[in-house]
Amino acid sequence: MTDDHGRPLRVVLADDEAMVRAGVRAILAADPGIEVVGEAGDGRAAVELVRAHRPRVALLDIRMPRWDGIGAAAEIRRLVPGTATVMLTTFGEDDLIARSLGHGASGFLLKSGDPRELLAGIRAVADGGAYLSPRVARRVIELSGGRMARAPGARDRLAGLTDREREVLALVGAGLSNAEIARRLHLVEGTVKSYLTSIFTRLDVRNRVQAAILAYEAGLVPPDRLTSPAPGFTRGA
């Protein structure tokens, strides 16, 4: 996995527990296409490292001193919008996961998850997409009141979309990248990006994670397809 110029994807890693950082770093180091260019033990230091190195991805623990991961993600989005943020969380941090959705995070991964899931999440957000750990995805849906309870409101929000925009939104929810959506719908990638800009504006969502959840709630996406990769391969968005 490399960037558009064939270079390793640059990642900044932030967690206040040195043992956790060591474990995550070891997983990332196993992929020759990833380079960890900086490590931090708090959110403020993470932001400074991102400003200095301009990595493709910042992997942030949600709970950290001197700015938690949510605050760091918001600041990174403001200062270095080209860096995608992925939140590392433990199961049960429901309030923090919900808050993170509103601050532009592109991915949510469990510290206790499969290492392959970590790499899949990095790949997805590095390509401009979104990734939710399947367990986190289910929990986010539960927190939002459940699919059945929110379906009418979600369908009402989608009512203003064109048929093509609904097609694009469904494929975003299923986890396809812009390039994959373009191939599926026989469009150029720039057109897909234009559709997404319109969709995000019409639905008043900030990112692909929020759009994917809305697509799920409205019934456009089966439960087992919500921003999680199909078995046997990983893909960006």
Image (cartoon, rainbow, N blue to C red):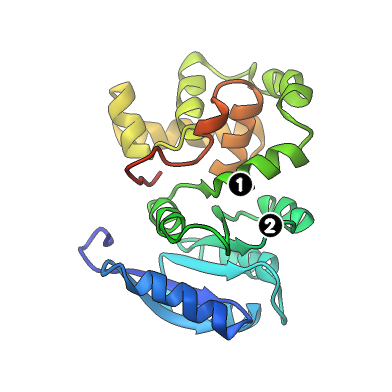
Residue at disc 2, secondary structure: loop
Asked whether disc 1 touches disc 2, contact meaning CB atoms under 8 Å apart, the reply is yes
Residue 103 point in image, percent of width and height? 67, 56
Query: Mark on residue 159?
Result: none
Tell me: residue 98, above or below residue 34: above
Number of numbered labels in the structure image: 2
Q: Quadrant of residue 159?
A: top right
Tell me: residue 110, above or below residue 232: below
Q: Quadrant of the N terminus?
A: bottom left
Residue 135 point in image, percent of width and height? 61, 46
Q: Quadrant of residue 27?
A: bottom left
Q: Quadrant of the C terminus?
A: top left
Identity of the residue drawn at 75% across and 18% down: 152
Closest to the observer, 184 or 197 = 184
Q: What residue does disc 2 label? A: 91
Residue 116 in sight here? yes
Query: Mark on residue 135?
Result: 1
